[in-house]
Image (tube, rainbow, N blue to C red):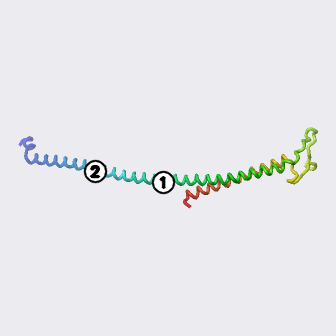
Amino acid sequence: MNFLSLFFSPKVILVIIITAVLGLGSVKIYSSGKTNGAVAVQQKWDTQEKLRSIEIAKVLEDTHNKTKQLQIAAYKQKEKYDQKINALNKSLAVAISRVSNRTDRPADNSASGKSPSSESAPSCTGAQLFRSDAEFLIRESARANEIVILLEQCQKQYSEVEKLINGN
């Protein structure tokens, strides 16, 4: 028997055909599984992304609503504190007008070479202050009160933001 006769025997040809059919069938099954698997994975990913997009949209809407609430509260609070500052400015004007009749500070004696000592310097109560000194103290007092009002406003806004963020 020669080599070619073995190759063309019906059994060998049958084995080659069966192997080829099984090989092609395996490739077809693999290709089909790969395609169907990719489609399933893509559908799952698309579903997850859609749910995530919906969740993000809800968070954004909630954040937008909270921001609106804070802006409205801050505006109302600013109006309230502006009224307090306006009242403070009115009382400042009244206080300054009350001391406008006071005398001015006398001229300084530094040109004569004399420096006032603590013994010779006159002392006084608030009612006896010179006009410029009284105005200075009134303005400083008003400025301090305005800072207190602004601090209260800042603290209140902070606590409102903190409550909103923490969900209280």
Count of labels in the image: 2
Which image quadrant: the N terminus?
Answer: top left
Q: Nearer the viewer, residue 152 or 49?
A: 152
In the rendered view, tell whether residue 111 sits above or below residue 83: above
For the point 76% across and 52% down, the residue is 91
Residue at image position (80%, 51%) is 95
Residue occupying the point 13% across, 46% down: 17
Q: Amino acid at mark 1?
A: Val
The residue wearing badge 2 is: 36
Q: Give the left or right position of residue 98, taking residue 161 as reference.
A: right
- Compare marks 1 and 2 and give the one earlier in the sequence: 2
Q: Secondary structure at mark 2?
A: helix
Give the amino acid at mark 2.
Asn
Please state the horizontal and vertical placement of residue 153, each as a whole percent of the image: 66, 54
Which quarter shows the C terminus? bottom right
Point out residue 160 in the picture as x, y percentages from the top left corner. 60, 57
Residue 24 is situated, as x and y percent measured from the top left of the image, at 19, 46
The residue at which mark 1 appears reads as 59
* Element type at mark 1: helix
